[in-house]
Amino acid sequence: MPRRSPFAIRLTREERAALEQQAAKYTTAYRDVVRAKIILLAADDLRNDIIASRLSLQRQIVSKWRKRFFYQRLAGLAEKPRGGRPARFSPQRRR
């Protein structure tokens, strides 16, 4: 039997409202919608494996976002800069 996550999520009213709004928007990036849904389900005290099966994700992905939200709250769900070489051409010039 899987163990319960040590990162218990408790949301404030403001956080819950922001996450519900983000999860319901059609114009929001898919990754942001999924992250919001993960946290909302985690706040309902569901285990990572159950959340993963409901959202068709890997358990490790759910665990990652739960942990980041636990430590950084809403700011933890934002996209972080990625490593690698900078682009040589602007997006308009690539075409």
Image (spheres, rainbow, N blue to C red):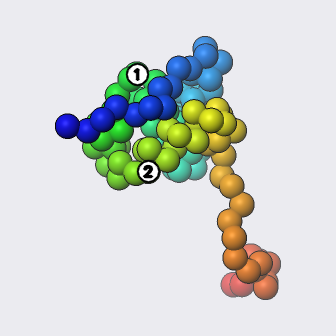
Work out whether residue 79 can be spotted: yes
Q: Give me the residue at 71% from left, 60% from top.
A: 81
Q: Answer with the quarter of the image where residue 6 lies.
A: top left
SS at mark 2? helix
Comparing 78 with 26, the one in front is: 78
Q: Is residue 49 above or below residue 42?
A: below
Comparing 95 with 20, the one in front is: 20
Q: Give me the residue at 73% from left, 80% from top.
A: 85
Name the N-terminal-most of marks 1 and 2.
Answer: 1
Work out whether residue 51 can be spotted: no
In the displayed structure image, the side of residue 68 where residue 52 appears, left or right: left
Q: Position of residue 82 (x, y in %)?
A: 68, 65
Per the rendering, the mark at residue 61 is 2
> Outermost residue toward the left?
1
Query: In the picture, which quadrant includes the C terminus?
Result: bottom right
Q: Answer with the quarter of the image where residue 13 lies.
A: top right
Task: Tell me whether circle 1 and circle 2 mark residues in contact (CB < 8 Å).
Answer: no
The 10 Å Cα crowd at callout 1, few under 14, some 14 to 19, many 20 or more, is few
Q: Give me the residue at 79% from left, 85% from top.
A: 88
Three-letter code for the amino acid on which mark 1 is drawn? Asp
Q: Position of residue 86 (x, y in %)?
A: 77, 78
Q: Give me the residue at 50% from left, 38% from top.
A: 66
Q: Which residue is mark 1?
A: 44
Three-letter code for the amino acid on which mark 2 is drawn? Ile
Q: Position of residue 77 (x, y in %)?
A: 61, 42
Query: How far separated are the C-alphas under marks 1 and 2?
Result: 18 Å
Query: In the picture, which quadrant includes the N terminus?
Result: top left
